[in-house]
Image (cartoon, rainbow, N blue to C red):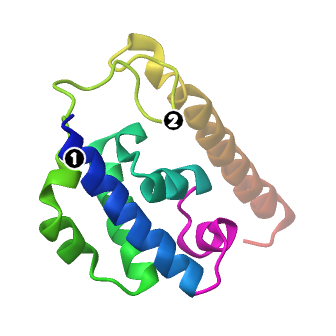
Amino acid sequence: MHETQTQARKRVGEIFRAKRDEMHLSLKEVENATSIRMMYLQAIEEGHIDKFLSPVYALGFVRQYAAFLGFDGQKIVDENKEAFQMQVPKSDPPYGIGTLEKRGMPHSGGRSMPNALWIGIGITVLIGAFFFAKFLGVL
C-alpha cells in the first residue's frame, strides 16, 4: 500500500466524518439508518477500508454511506481511484460465509433428511385425514 493511497483514504474518510458531523448524526444513528455496522463506518472515516471482509464489501459500504450522506458514491469512488485500489483474493476462502463447514463436504447436505421426514409425515397425516373423513361419511 502506498502512502498516497493511505492519504487518499483518510481524505475521503474526513469528508464523510465532516458531513456526518454537519448533519449532527452519531455513528450509531448512521448504523441504524444504513445497516452498516459501526465498526465499518468507523473504518471508512479513519481510512482503514482494507480491514473489510473483501474489496466488494468495502466499495459497497463506501457507496452506500456516501449516498446516505447525500454524496454520489460512484463519483467519489471514481474521483479517488487510488484510495479504492485493493487486492482481490485469488481464490475462494475454504469456508462459506455463514457456515463452518468446508465447501463441497459430502455431509454438508444433511439437512435434507429431516425435511423429507416432515414431508412424509405431512402426507401420511393428509391420507389419514382423508380416510377418517370417508369413514365418518363426510366425503
Relative image position of residue 89 (x, y in whole percent):
21, 29
Residue found at the far right of this picture: 136
Q: Between residues 8 and 100, which one lies in front from this camera angle?
A: 8
Relative image position of residue 5 (x, y in whole percent):
21, 47
Using the rendered image of the protein, determine whether residue 53 is visible from the camera's viewpoint. no
Q: Residue at x 68, y 66 (%)?
A: 28
Q: Between residues 12 and 97, which one lies in front from this camera angle?
A: 12
Determine which residue is flagged by label 2: 98
Q: Is residue 8 left or right of residue 114?
A: left
| In magenta segment, residue 27 | yes
Q: Secondary structure at mark 1?
A: helix
Q: Is residue 99 above or below residue 134?
A: above
Q: Residue at x 51, y 28 (%)?
A: 99
Image disc number at residue 5: 1
Q: Between residues 14 and 134, which one lies in front from this camera angle?
A: 14
Q: Is residue 63 above or below residue 10?
A: below
Q: Give the residues in magenta.
A: 23-37
| Amino acid type indicated by mark 2 | Gly
Q: Is residue 96 left or right of residue 40?
A: left
> Which quarter shows the C terminus?
bottom right
Q: Secondary structure at mark 2?
A: loop
Using the rendered image of the protein, determine whether residue 35 is visible from the camera's viewpoint. yes
Numbered label tally = 2
Q: Is residue 5 above or below residue 133?
A: above
Residue 20 in which image quadrant? bottom right
